[in-house]
Image (tube, rainbow, N blue to C red):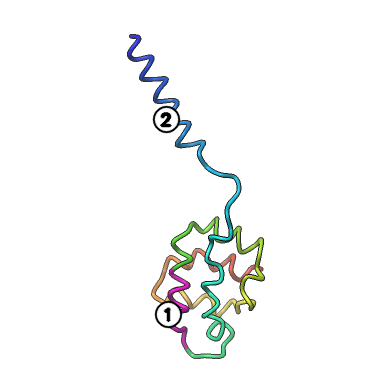
Amino acid sequence: MAMMKVSFVLSLILLSFVTGGKCSEVDCAKVPIENLEPCKAFVLGESNGPSVECCKGVKSWTTISEEIVCECYRKSPQRLSYKPDQIRATTLPSVCQVPEFYNYIACLVAN
């Protein structure tokens, strides 16, 4: 019986580490907002297709959770030198073949 109590207490301690370990502050300096800078010409309609570097930037956003990227972009939209055109931005996931990027479009064009 004592062994079960010890195991239960240890389980609670481990669970608290797993669930309570989230930081409330995100280090936005580590979030690759600027990686979409190469998309500027395409998203503003100045070129017919995105560059390879643009698509790499699109892919880099999807390596971090949508919530974190969007929070950091909302805090510092000036990290991109342009305001993305909503229609052109929505084509990035398909033209760059990164469907996961659809989840990031709303925050990208909302600022």
N-terminal label among 1 and 2: 2
Q: Residue at x 41, y 69 (%)?
A: 99
The crowd level at tag 2 (other Cα within 10 Å; few <14, some 14-19, many 20+) is: few
Query: What percent of the width, then of the height, locates residue 83?
Result: 64, 77
State yes or no: residue 54 in magenta: yes
Q: Identify which amino acid the numbered label 2 is placed on.
A: Leu
Q: Quadrant of residue 40?
A: bottom right
State yes or no: residue 37 in magenta: no
Q: Is residue 108 left or right of residue 99?
A: right
Dot 1 corresponds to which residue? Answer: 95
Q: Which residue sits furthest front?
A: 29
Q: Residue at x 47, y 68 (%)?
A: 101
The crowd level at tag 1 (other Cα within 10 Å; few <14, some 14-19, many 20+) is: few
Q: Residue at x 44, y 31 (%)?
A: 15
Q: Nearer the viewer, residue 20 or 85?
A: 20
Query: What percent of the width, then of the height, locates residue 5?
Result: 38, 14
Residue mark closest to the camera, 1 vs 2: 2
Label 1 secondary element: helix
Which dot marks residue 52?
none
Q: Which residue sits furthest top?
A: 1
Q: Quadrant of the N terminus?
A: top left
Q: Quadrant of the C terminus?
A: bottom right
Q: Identify which amino acid the numbered label 1 is placed on.
A: Val
Query: What percent of the width, then of the height, locates residue 88?
Result: 54, 81
Q: CA distance from mark 1 to mark 2?
A: 44 Å
Which dot marks residue 14?
2
In the image, which residues are magenta?
Answer: 49-59
Rendered view: 78 above or below 7: below
